[in-house]
Image (cartoon, helix red, strand yellow):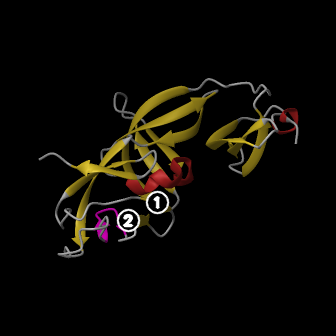
Amino acid sequence: MRVNHINEGRIYQVLKAQHTQHGRGGATIQVELRDVDTGNKTTERFRTDEAIERVFVEEKSFTFLYHEGDSVMLMEPTTFEQLEVPKEMFGKAAAYLKDDMSVTVQYYDGRPMSASVPQRVTCTVVEAQPNTKGLTAAPQYKRVVLDNGLTVLNVGVLTSKLYQFDLLCSTLVEAGDEIVINTTDDSYMTRAKE
């Protein structure tokens, strides 16, 4: 598809981008796009010399209140005005939403088009496998369950009913510990400071 074919007056949000070089051929960028109006996702490839018009958005901070079904209720902290947005606007990061969390909503032309959680989120470990002794020659990982229902498996995969995350977790983490997770790449960062 040509660039003009997908951009015919429509606004797309880039969800993922991957740059690839094909042998002697030119480099391409494969992007996963979401149509802001319809929510439909598509994957496109562009040559690196193709120009795409960038849309500038306004960002506003909101406080997460609660979610009900497929909707999320947010509150503007200064005016206390409430805003209802679809949960899919947060994508896989919706699993990290907690009460009174500060979130960012991106607006284009007065309409909310995407939302995001903070880059670093603290989660509590509610269940952890016991440590295994004597197996220190290879890296060790263990299964832990977080307070938001996400599970870190011993092979380093964080799963939920809706989404799947890659996450490596230390064997030193025990039930009751708080860990910090990077929400941009869903990686275990460190144990939270007390």
Vertical comparison of 35 with 92: above or below:
above
Q: Is residue 147 magenta?
A: yes
First along the sequence among labels 2 and 1: 2
- Drawn side of residue 178 relative to residue 89, left or right: left
Give me the residue at 48% from left, 70% from top: 161
Marker disc for residue 142? none
Q: Residue 92: percent from the left, percent from the top?
A: 50, 54
Give SS at disc 2: loop
The reply to whether the C-beta atoms of the residues labelled 2 and 1 are less than 8 Å apart is yes
Within 10 Å of the Cα at label 2, are there few (<14), some (14-19), or many (20+) other Cα atoms?
A: many
Asked whether 50 or 114 is in front, the reply is 50
Vertical comparison of 113 with 59: above or below:
below
Asked whether 72 or 159 is in front, the reply is 159
Q: Residue 79: percent from the left, percent from the top?
A: 37, 29
- Picture quarter containing residue 176? bottom left
The residue that label 2 is drawn on is 150
Marker disc for residue 165? 1
Quarter of the picture containing the N terminus is: top right
- Drawn side of residue 184 relative to residue 192, left or right: right
Highlighted magenta segment, given as a residue range = 143-152
- Drawn side of residue 154 relative to residue 171, left or right: right
Is residue 97 in view?
no
Q: Residue 147: percent from the left, percent from the top?
A: 28, 63
Q: Residue 95: percent from the left, percent from the top?
A: 42, 57
Asked whether 23 or 158 is in front, the reply is 23
